[in-house]
Amino acid sequence: MLKRNQIPSKLEAVMEHALQPYTALVPRTDKLVVQKAGHTALVTIDNPPANTWDSDMLHGLPELLAHLNADPDIYALVLTGRGERFFPQVPI
């Protein structure tokens, strides 16, 4: 079984060959990275070292999720953080 902190790196390794940039929407901030593999969107919070939130991310994530939810080509969403820590500090 994978340890919790290994899941993002293992997931990225598995999906890496199929990941493409998601170009239908440019997020409000470059700290939210969106990629697509088939019908799955991968949203990575990239604000090291702890992936904590800032104002742009707090406003940008709901906009991004609403857009992905309305996209008929997206069936699933994976939300992860870059690196070893993922502390969203907000209800998701």
Image: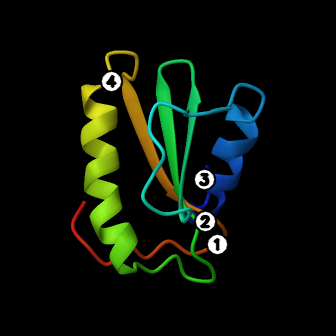
Amino acid tagged 4: Asp
Residue 84 position, x and y percent, is 64, 72
Residue, x 38% and y 71% (percent of image)?
56
Residue, disc 3: 7
Residue, disc 2: 5
* Mark toward the viewer: 2 or 1: 1
Residue, disc 4: 71
Distance (Cα) linking label 3 and label 1: 10 Å
Query: Along the polypeptide, which appears first: circle 2 or circle 1?
Result: 2
Amino acid tagged 2: Asn
Residue, x 24% and y 41% (percent of image)?
66
Which residue is at the front of the view, 85 or 42?
42
Distance (Cα) linking label 4 and label 2: 30 Å
Distance (Cα) linking label 2 and label 1: 6 Å
Give left or right: position of 29 versus 7.
Answer: left
Q: Which mark is residue 84?
A: 1
Residue 34 position, x and y percent, is 53, 44
> Pointers 2 and 1 in contact (CB under 8 A)?
yes
* Mark toward the viewer: 1 or 4: 4
Query: Along the polypeptide, which appears first: circle 3 or circle 4?
Result: 3
State whether residue 42 is above or below residue 90. Answer: above
Query: Along the polypeptide, which appears first: circle 1 or circle 4?
Result: 4
- Location of the C terminus by quadrant is bottom left
